[in-house]
Image (tube, grey):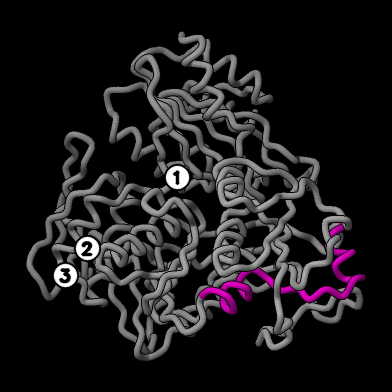
Amino acid sequence: MPGTSNFYPLSKELNTIPKHLHHIHLMGICGTAMASLAGALKEQGYKVTGSDRNAYPPMSLFLEKIRVPVLQGFKPENLDPRPDLVVVGNVVTRENPEAKALAQLHIPFISLPQALNHFVMKGKKRIVIAGTHGKTTTSSLAAWVLEVAGMDPGFMIGGIPRDFEKGLKLGNGDFFVVEGDEYDTAFFDKGPKFFHYNPWALILTSIEYDHADIYDNLDQLKGNFLSLIQLVPGHGCIIANAEDPLVMEAVQNTPCLVYTYGMGKEADCRLVRTSRNQGMTEVILAVKGGATLRLYTGLYGKHNLSNLMAVVLLSQWLHIPQQTLKKAAMTFSGVKRRQEVLGEEKGILVLDDFAHHPTAVKETIRAVKEAFPERRLIAVFEPRSNSSRRNVFQAKYTKSFDMADLAMIPEPPMMEKIPVKERFSSSKLVQDLQKKGIEAYYVPQPDKLLQQLLSMVKPGDTVLFMSNGDFDNLPHRFLKSLRIDPP
């Protein structure tokens, strides 16, 4: 933070980045956005190295593919040979031994958003997708629509869009799609990342309390979203989720155009009806100023169709032809770890998802159950995020599993980092689910959970894994075990 004598963060104007750069080092390189930045920097000709506590798919595989070395653990020797510039991820604390060495060596360093501004987004019209939920899918779909339209967009997305197989693309076009994260920027900049992105257009999907480790209450979070909205220029636009009352409250009295999407008749893009057939969803939309729009998409679930409507309005704003939009919607392949089908073995379908907030868990389970209603749905949830490991959402999670036929929940990892009085209890959640009549199991260790799950599954099941981390590689280990020793 400013005023800390041992650290020398660069100015937000970036005017102290060395003019002659060869070697850039990324601390916390295995985060999705950081790994994507590593790819972009290497593409621009820089020597790129990185360090992190551990690496796991899909980013570890991505870094290996592009031949960026990852040093395991944070250590002072990772800065030898001395890099010209260091990009510091927000997983790095001021007490990190590598960060301390960084300060002592007086190596210039910046945050991830600063790096994006300087190396990636300069001179582009920024399309920022923000909100508590749906950012990654909406960003990926928006980028794909622009790509299909021949606009060659740049993008930075907090996931891996399957149509691009990378989370960051430089692009030669005028537009840059960026996922606007509300989490803090770095240990020396506690404002949210999206403050750095200067949106020309803003999609606001939702506002709900999250990140209990950095936000004391909902009002703090709302305040940052309100500040983000004020960054949109008068000639820009905001596309807002009309189903979210906090979003609609936030966009009142903004100087720019505001377009809305949702179920109500007053929405500029309204969902009329949907149907699902042979793995595709038919979507009928009523769009103001135009005829009824029929789209076909591989997306399913209310939350994903909401994301689709936001991108429909963005397409109208950019004057993208309807035929192009229809082609993009039909060919969009989705995002890794967002309702991703890992495979089906012996009649057991295995899905992997990033859901961790109670609302995301609930909507993901609902979407999967509605898409595969004839199958028994086993929901395996790891409460791993900084918020889900805290008891702030303890009661709310009991409402997230209503559409699951069976739930399995392990002990959260790294609980020693959470104050005892604030800790989430997996065993209590399981007990509460059982009281509601939901078949639920508390299995503390991932290895034991794997063995119990293998003993319980049967042909016709869907197994949905949910975690914002690697989950001890459990989804892939489960699928591999099915192939070796089927039930």
Q: Which residue is mark 2?
A: 264
Locate residue 227, reporting x and y percent.
53, 80
Locate residue 396, reporting x and y percent.
53, 44
Q: Categorize mark 3 by other alpha carbons within 10 Å: few (<14), some (14-19), many (20+).
A: few
Which SS class for mark 2? loop
At label 1, the amino acid type is Lys
Identity of the residue drawn at 51% across and 81% down: 122
Q: Main secondary structure of the magenta part?
A: helix
Q: Which residue is mark 3?
A: 321
Q: Which residue is mark 1?
A: 336
Residue 105 horizontal side relative to residue 287, left or right = right
Dots 2, 3 in contact, CB < 8 A? no
Region of the chain picked out in magenta, as a range: 97-120
At label 3, the amino acid type is Pro
Q: Categorize mark 2 by other alpha carbons within 10 Å: few (<14), some (14-19), many (20+).
A: some
Locate residue 363, reporting x and y percent.
40, 44
Which SS class for mark 3? loop
Say which quarter of the image contains residue 349. top left
